[in-house]
Image: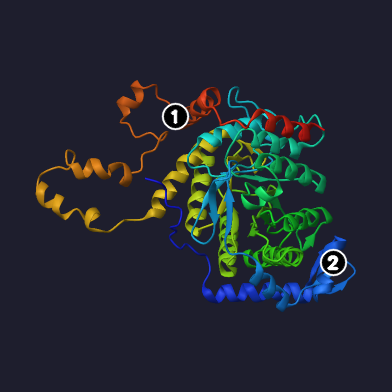
Amino acid sequence: MKPDYTRNLGYSTITPAQFEKLHFATLDILERIGVNVFNGEALKLLKSAGARVNGERARIPEWMVKEALASAPGSVHVCDRSGKRAMTLENGRSYYGTGSDTPFVYDVYTGEHRPAVKQDVANAAKVCDALPDINFIMSMGHISDSASGKPYVGEFEAMTLNTEKPIVYTAGSLRDIKDIYEMACIVCGGEDKLQEYPYIILYDEPSSPLQHTAEALDKLLFCAEKRIPVIYAPAVIMGGTGPVTPAGSIAQANAEIISGLVIHQLKAKGAPFIAGGGAPPMDLRTMICSYGAPERDLTCTTLVAMARYYDLPVFTTAGCSDAQAFDQQAGLETGFNLLISSLAGGNLIHDIGYIGVGMTASLEAVMLCNEGIGMARRLLRGVEVNDSALALDVIEEVGPGGNYMSEEHTSEHCREMIWAPELLNRMDYENWKSSGKLTFGDQANLKARNILENYKAKPLPEDIQSQIKAVADR
């Protein structure tokens, strides 16, 4: 049965009255405190539209926020590399993808913790292309071996050559984004085709607290002009770059998102914009930004709820852990935040496979999350109640003391109704022992290696590959 991505169980961290309070706090921040804007074009757009601009500080009135929210689309369609509709980012639909730009990886063959290289990004894209519950790809590694000195461009090349799935990419500069856009146009057959069938989404972010850098806005404005989907997601750190209270950091993060939206819509009304972000806490004992903390889940899911309040597509995070190895802590934290984000109904749920406080990519963790996403999706489907599912005629036929194993009703519905894991152990002890006593970590490693050695991702035509490589290498 094809998974139904439109169900969620309505998990929310705040009440309707609290939505209003957070919204009005956001408006107060924007109109009274304002944001720093380090980009000349963005400042001109704001001033011309009616914002109060003093130097680099822009104060944005409520009516400008209302206009931006009214023009931003509530649904964003994303295709795969071949142009087929792959994701519809709207209320009630959730999709899952890997995390991005980790400087380190765990080598799936040697177990070594080492700097990420371009082949790691290609390998991760290939593995995720094979996994049914991974819907989009981000670069699982910030490469340390870029021959051209353009690591972000090299990462995009490695991804687009090894997966058909949609790509959420990052870029260091406007030059990077122009190169990546050119490569995507080559794949799609031109700018018009890329706009009609977009398979790329830029991940961009402001700088907390309350600042929009020149580089971030260059990228945001480029995407608006080209009408390519863009995520604008702050990463406020509670107690560091934001208030230590969840509500304060959420209000600040929301102000950063909404001010970015205003600039984006002033550049091109109706251009696709995706909200999101989070406010993880700083652990004041170790000074790390925690990916596994419950406060991170609270702030991420509340920002999801705020995006729903505004009818904006939303990007969030799950499937990640602070654990420095693929161990029990990684299993606990990734499973917990996967479930919470799924229940909250985020559209793009990324960071699948992140461990080591967001610094390390693990293909074994990706395997764990692929299973966890399958479980979460089964939960979100809920209990179907209709005549066939109630099975009253079957219950009558079997009667007291019988069993249902040989019934046609069982064979017809078992695959649909009972989710079957691929790697999770459901054997008794003796069978598990006789099959080699493999742990989940063993199974996950073997599966990743098997995909790398045997799976063939659909290749692009050779002339397209050559053109992409020429852009990446120049």
Q: Callout 1, which amino acid?
A: Thr
Q: Is residue 13 above or below residue 377?
A: below
Q: Callout 2, which amino acid?
A: Leu
Q: Residue at x 43, y 49 (%)?
A: 377
Numbered-mark total: 2
**Where residue 283 appears, x then y in whole percent?**
66, 52
Q: Residues within 10 Å of mark 1 (few under 14, many from 20)?
A: few
Q: Nearer the viewer, residue 460 or 401?
A: 460
The part of the image, by quadrant, that contains residue 7 is: bottom left
Q: Is residue 329 left or right of residue 393?
A: right
Q: Which residue is mark 1?
A: 439
1 or 2: tag closer to the N-terminus: 2
Q: Is residue 187 above or below residue 384?
A: above
Kindly tell me whether residue 114 is visible in this rendering.
no
Q: Residue at x 75, y 77 (%)?
A: 61
Q: Nearer the viewer, residue 12 or 113?
A: 12
Point out the image quarter for the N terminus.
top left
**Where residue 122 appears, x then y in whole percent?**
64, 31
Q: Is residue 379 above or below residue 275?
A: above
Q: Residue at x 75, y 32 (%)?
A: 144
**Where residue 109 appears, x then y in whole percent?**
58, 23
What separation in Å lies between label 1 and label 2 (alpha carbons)? 56 Å
Give the numbered dot on residue 43. 2
Q: Residues within 10 Å of mark 2 (few under 14, many from 20)?
A: many
Tags 1 and 2 touching, CB below 8 Å: no
Q: Nearer the viewer, residue 462 or 173?
A: 462
Between marks 1 and 2 in the image, the one whose residue lies nearer the viewer: 2
The part of the image, by quadrant, that contains residue 280 is: bottom right
- Seen from this angle, which residue lies furthest right? 55
Q: What SS does tag 1 mark? A: loop
Point out the image quarter for the C terminus.
top right
The part of the image, by quadrant, that contains residue 210 is: bottom right
